[in-house]
Amino acid sequence: MKFSEVIGQEDVKQRLLRQLNEGRQPHALLLSGPEGCGGLAMALALGTYLLCEHSGPDDSCGECPSCRQIGKYGHPDLHFSFPIIRKSETTTCDDYMPEWNAMIREGAYFGLSDWIERTGAEGKQALIPDAEGDNILRKLSLTSYGGGYKVLIMWQPERLTASAANNLLKFLEEPTPLTVFILVSADASRILPTLLSRTQQIEMSPLSVTTIAAALKQRNGLSAEAAMEVARRAGGSYLAALRHISIDDESKVYFEQFVSLMRMAWARDVRGLSRWADEVSTMGRERQKSLLQYMQYLIRENFIYNFHQSELTYMTDEESAFALKFARFINERNVIDFMNELSQAQRDVEQNVNAKILFFSFALKLTVCIRK
Ligand SMILES: [Zn+2]
């Protein structure tokens, strides 16, 4: 990753480059700042710059074997440590490297919850475990592969166990030459004070609205207007902005699924309903649950719409336009039935009932509800 690929944070880039070019590169650097401001991206850009074979005054070259290796499948002198879910006492970050490399390749803007979800261990507490402390010391004691720097990027050092942190202190007290430690923290106040005092801390600020909007336009293809709207709601975090756009895209799909389901249920189009069930059955459980939740919201909103109390409804323009014609089909005779069917479907999804059968029988029941 090049410095030019890091969103905003020009002052931090310049400071890092100045230090390096003046030969004042600290052996332990802490980049701290709220999630989504680009700490990990900056650490990767610095690591790439240190290992690049033809780095210029402002950036790595992006083309030498080192740069290409980092971009593709990792570099033997660039190491990573990050919070993981321990499978046994000997679990280290090495056991998660394929997932981690894949995640990094998709972009350096992700949060802890994204990472945990990727490892398939939702709901468990992620730490940098004891065994990883020894693993780091072992890696850093090796001679560098390329004869130059060795870099270790540690994401979220606030999640080090006490024993792993102590191992790290040993290294920081007697650093090996040409070894650079880059710590990236979303909450520096939770880092062990003895560790914190041995690092040079650089604070990264939340990104400005215009910086986020420009990135959304350029990287995510949003129109200038949409980019500004999403950026304003992102609170300085590009990550939050990314989450907003994916939720917006998602609800469009849900809306279309809702509309076609209701139309076919009214028309008693059994074939269409079977196709609808097939499509929904391939969506994955989490999205199926979100779809059912979204449908509960729309049924409720359409029911309320009949009372002509616009201050009580929260629909988007598209949803309201549909409600204008559809709301009369949701009335006091069937609203409870709709809600019951939706929550029953949600329970069935949670209990792993065969999705095709479940959604088809759910869709058929709606043909009865909607005509009440
Ligand atoms: Zn290079």
Image: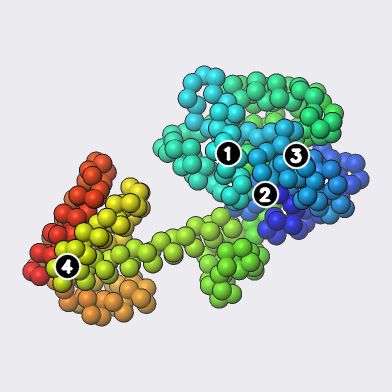
The residue positioned 25% from the left and 80% from the top of the image is 324
Marks 3 and 1, Cα distance to the nearest angstrom?
22 Å
On residue 29, which mark appears? 3
Amino acid of disc 4: Asp
From the image, state whether disc 3 or disc 1 is nearer to you: 1
Amino acid of disc 3: Leu
Asked if labels 3 and 4 touch by Cβ distance under 8 angstroms, the answer is: no
Marks 1 and 2, Cα distance to the nearest angstrom?
14 Å
Amino acid of disc 1: Trp
First reached walking from the N terminus: tag 4 or tag 1: 1
Mark 3 crowd level (few <14, some 14–19, many ≥20, 10 Å Cα) = many
Asked if labels 1 and 4 touch by Cβ distance under 8 angstroms, the answer is: no
From the image, state whether disc 2 or disc 3 is nearer to you: 2
Q: Is the residue marked 1 within 8 Å of ligand 1, measured from its CB?
A: no
* Left or right of 289 on screen, residue 144: right
Mark 4 sits on what residue? 269
Residue 274 seen in the current view: yes
Mark 2 crowd level (few <14, some 14–19, many ≥20, 10 Å Cα) = many
Mark 2 sits on what residue? 41
The C terminus - image quarter? bottom left
Marks 4 and 1, Cα distance to the nearest angstrom?
46 Å
Q: Position of residue 222 (x, y in %)?
A: 56, 69
Mark 1 sits on what residue? 100
